[in-house]
Amino acid sequence: FSPLQLSIKPNEAELAHLYYLPKAHKPGTPLRPIISGLKHPTIKISKFLDDLLRPLFDQMASNSTVTSGFELIKKLQEWSTVNMCQDTTFCTIDVTDLYTMVPQIEGVFSLRKMLNQLKLKEIGKLKIETIIRLSRFVMTNNYFSYNGQFYHHVRGGAMGSPLTLTISNCYMYFFERQIVNQSRNSNGLYFRYINDIFITINWPIRHLLKQIERWNKFDENINLSANIGSIVNFLDLNMENRDGQLYTTVFQKPSYEPYYLPFNSIHPLHMKKNIPFAMLLRAIRYSSTFKSYLNECEKLRMALLLNKYPTKIIDEQFNNMLLKFNVNEPLTFNNYVSYRQAVINYPIK
């Protein structure tokens, strides 16, 4: 690589600025702080490092992280066939303000631990020490403006900086090792998506609560807020333990409104056609019963009509989705489960 790749012209540099987005789905409507630094002096270094390091993190953490609700469904299905019973408890955990709570020096140190664990001496002709020094430079040089005042980010990282996600993920990976092992040694399941954790366990709830209290003492920077029960939501997936049987469907936050790309927009037709296709695919993957699938299809159809999609396009894309996965007959109560499983098992290209 050339050092010029990482530099930004002085006349193009711009100090990051802070703004807030409301979390409309949470009680009290708290604010999410966003530091927008698309022209920040370190943005190119941050992106360069993130492109180098994120694939390595994904490789290291593949057994304890998921990237979507669909990925979790596949893991949960496999686990539930052997381990799920009437007493199985679901637990979702939110890591409070992860991006802004990860200490900068320890966050960068977690990158070094990852690279040591992967036994890497250099990446793309860059020595590990150079990568660590650049990462430290990015993390400790977050400056931004707000209301005409200038500030220096001394804790955590900016949400608008690409490297912040990888460092936060890496820090959490080493934080959660004992929790992962404890869960899985008890035939439980543990997966995380950034700051959202999902656990299934066959412990009594009182024991799980004590463990969460203990986990909250591991690191003063990490605060875990748990929701425990037989019905939980994780990402866009709703899960229920109904007498030892797993039931799933699509979850939508209370703030959800049925607005998609309007059909009368100027976007290319193929982009608009992809929306009913993708949404129906999610419906069949997530809906464990034919009844919940029909309910989801009806909600989807109404939302598409609201956004001016012609009935012909909706029907055409619904049929195309089913045909792509070799579903060549109408879905019914009798054949739904087997066809759905075939769709879930279909290799993703």
Image (cartoon, helix red, strand yellow):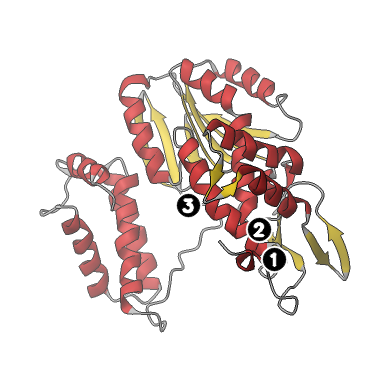
Image location of residue 262, percent across then percent down:
42, 76
Query: Is residue 145 shown above or below 77?
Result: below
Choose mark 1 or mark 3, whichever is in front. Answer: 1
Q: Secondary structure at mark 3?
A: loop
Task: Say which of 9 and 101 sits in front.
Answer: 9
Q: Does 260 sit left or right of 220 as displayed? A: left
Q: CA distance from mark 1 to mark 3?
A: 30 Å
Q: Secondary structure at mark 1?
A: loop
Image location of residue 270, percent across then percent down:
31, 74
In this view, which residue lies farthest toward the left? Answer: 329
Q: CA distance from mark 2 to mark 3?
A: 28 Å
Task: Say which of 300 and 80 sits in front.
Answer: 80
Query: Is residue 256 shown above or below 227?
Result: below
Are circles 1 and 2 on residues that touch, CB within 8 Å? yes
Query: Is residue 6 shown above or below 68?
Result: below
Q: Residues within 10 Å of mark 3 (few under 14, many from 20)?
A: few
Q: CA distance from mark 1 to mark 2?
A: 7 Å
Q: Secondary structure at mark 2?
A: loop
**Residue 161: which disc?**
2
Give the residue at x 25% y 73%.
313
Q: Amino acid at mark 3?
A: Gln
**Quadrant of the rendered image containing residue 72:** top left
Question: Which residue is tagged 3?
Answer: 252
Q: Amino acid at mark 1?
A: Gly
> Can residue 27 be seen from the camera position used here?
no
Task: Say which of 239 and 271 sits in front.
Answer: 271
Task: Say which of 47 and 252 sits in front.
Answer: 47
**Residue 37: which disc?**
1
